[in-house]
Amino acid sequence: MKYMMLVCTDTEPETDESLVPDVEVWVTENDASGRRLAGNQLTAPASATTVRVRGGELLLTDGPFAETKEVIVGFDLLECADLDEAIEVARAHPMAWLGRIELRPFHEG
C-alpha cells in the first residue's frame, strides 16, 4: 500500500537532539529496502503559489494558502505492507522528533 508521508515543522520539537536519528541513515535504509519510492525537501513557504479557479477566473496568491506556524517542508512516498509498517518507518524519521509526520494512504479505486 502506498502512503504519502508529509514532513512538517512543529512548534514543540524534541529538545534533546542527541536522541534524533540521522536523516541520511533513514534515507539509505528505506531506499535500500524499497519502502521509500521518492522524496525531497521543499523550498520555503514564501516561494509557494496558491492556485484557485472561482467563477471560471484564475486566482493566484503568492505564498501558502493558510497562515500557520507549522509548514510542510518535504515529502516521502512510501510503499508499505500496512499502516503499522508505515508508522514504524515514519517514527524513525528525524522530523518525527523535530517536527511532525502526517501519513496518508493513497485513495484506491
Image (cartoon, rainbow, N blue to C red):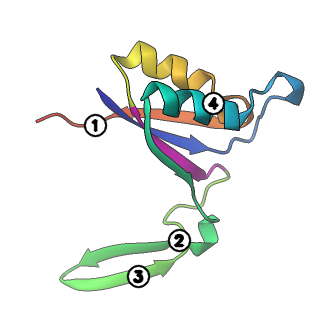
Q: Secondary structure at mark 3?
A: strand
Residue extent of the magenta highlight: 70-78
Q: Which residue is mark 4?
A: 26
Q: Is residue 42 magenta?
A: no
Q: What crowding class fits label 3: few (fewer than 14 Cα within 10 Å), some (14-19), or many (20 or more)? A: few
Q: Earlier in the sequence, mark 2 or mark 4?
A: 4
The residue positioned 53% from the left and 71% from the top of the image is: 48
Q: Earlier in the sequence, mark 2 or mark 3?
A: 2
The residue positioned 54% from the left and 52% from the top of the image is: 40
Q: Is residue 104 above or below residue 18?
A: below
Mark 3 vs mark 4: give the one in front: 4
- Which residue is the extreme one toward the bottom? 57
The residue positioned 67% from the left and 45% from the top of the image is: 9
Q: Secondary structure at mark 1?
A: loop
Mark number displayed over residue 60: 3
Residue 108 percent across, percent down from the top left: 17, 34
Q: Which residue is mark 2?
A: 48
Q: Which residue is mark 1?
A: 106
Locate the N terminus by quadrant. Answer: top left
Alpha carbons under labels 1 and 2: distance apart:
23 Å
Q: Quadrant of residue 20?
A: top right
Locate the C terminus by quadrant. Answer: top left
Alpha carbons under labels 2 and 4: distance apart:
27 Å
Residue type at tag 2: Ala
Q: Earlier in the sequence, mark 1 or mark 3?
A: 3
Alpha carbons under labels 3 and 4: distance apart:
37 Å
Residue type at tag 4: Trp
Residue 25 percent across, percent down from the top left: 68, 31
- Regarding residue 97, the answer to whether it shows in the image is yes
